[in-house]
């Protein structure tokens, strides 16, 4: 079964395509990672197979070291588009969701040191919880949203999308000038400061006012194996 996102307030679902992650889109988070904010958006991909939904478990496999939460605004694209100008970009958005860009920080640090891609640090199974999608027409302005993430009831991350270095329209313009976006693609727009480790047994709660909420538990072990389906 391909990963699907539920649309809030309806029975409709949308199949997840690619997930385009944006690194260092909040200056304070770039600084806490020891990096200067980049001159243009820094992009990476997470596979659709990493997506889980509300109420599911983030599963930390053996040997990956420290794993961090990154709460982000997820932007779900509504129609195939390329070379979209910022001024028309929001018309391409199906809706918005709460997304946690779970990151294997030790694997990422090792990859950075060796100049290797972040694929394993960002793309492991269960490493992309996404809430139901709030349709764009019912969501507030994506430039004025408040994000929060709590672990076991303790506030860990609090930020506002107004602090993004590249706004949602700017990101859609930048990405779609280089990579065609399709219905069901998701942009993970970057995280505010306060990223920290998750450990098995944690309860993670993330919320974006006017968009939605997401609750996930954290477990260790091997993520559930997909049932065999004949080709
Ligand atoms: Mg991130």
Image (spheres, rainbow, N blue to C red):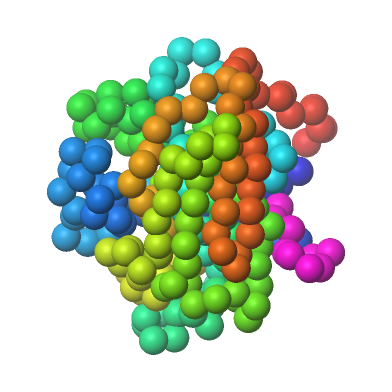
User: Where's the N terminus, which quadrant?
Assistant: top right
Determine whether 135 is above or below 22 in the image: below
Residue 102 location, x and y as percent? Answer: 48, 37
Q: Nearer the viewer, residue 215 or 40?
A: 215
In depth, the one of 177 and 124 nearer the eye is 124
Res 64 seen here: yes
| Residue at the farthest front position | 154
Verify whether residue 177 appears in magenta.
no
**Residue 126 is drawn in which quadrant?**
top right
- Residue at 81% across, 32% down: 229
Place of residue 91 in the rendered image (x, y in percent of width and height, measured from the top left) = 53, 83
Say whether residue 105 is left or right of residue 80: left
Residue 38: x, y in percent? 19, 55
Task: State whether the magenta stretch is mostly helix, strand or loop.
Answer: loop
Magenta highlight range = 4-12
Rendered image quadrant of residue 110: top left
At 57% from the left edge and 32% from the top edge, which residue is drawn?
152
Q: Residue shown at 33%/63% (left/top)?
A: 164
Left of 194 or right of it: where is 60? Answer: right
Q: Quadrant of the C terminus?
A: top right
């Amino acid at each position: 079964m391909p990963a699907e996102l539920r649309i809030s307030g309806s029975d409709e679902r949308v199949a997840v395509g690619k997930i385009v992650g944006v690194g260092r889109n909040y200056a304070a988070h770039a600084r806490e990672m020891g990096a200067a904010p980049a001159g243009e958006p820094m992009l990476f991909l997470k596979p659709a197979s990493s997506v889980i939904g509300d109420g599911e478990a983030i599963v930390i496999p053996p040997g990956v070291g420290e794993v961090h939460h990154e709460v982000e605004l997820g932007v779900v694209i509504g129609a195939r588009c390329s070379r979209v100008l910022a001024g028309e970009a929001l018309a391409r958005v199906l809706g918005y969701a709460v997304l946690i860009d779970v990151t294997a920080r030790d694997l990422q640090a090792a990859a950075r040191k060796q100049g290797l891609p972040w694929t394993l640090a960002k793309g492991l199974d269960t490493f992309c919880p996404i809430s139901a999608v709030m349709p764009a027409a019912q969501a507030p302005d994506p430039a004025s949203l408040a994000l929060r993430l709590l672990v076991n009831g303790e506030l860990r991350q609090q930020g506002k999308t107004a602090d993004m270095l590249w706004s949602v329209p700017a990101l859609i313009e930048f990405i779609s000038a280089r990579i065609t976006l399709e219905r069901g693609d998701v942009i993970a727009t970057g995280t505010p400061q306060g990223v920290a480790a998750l450990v098995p047994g944690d309860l993670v709660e993330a919320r974006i006012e006017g968009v939605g909420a997401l609750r996930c538990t954290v477990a260790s072990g091997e993520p559930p194996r997909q049932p065999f389906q004949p080709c």
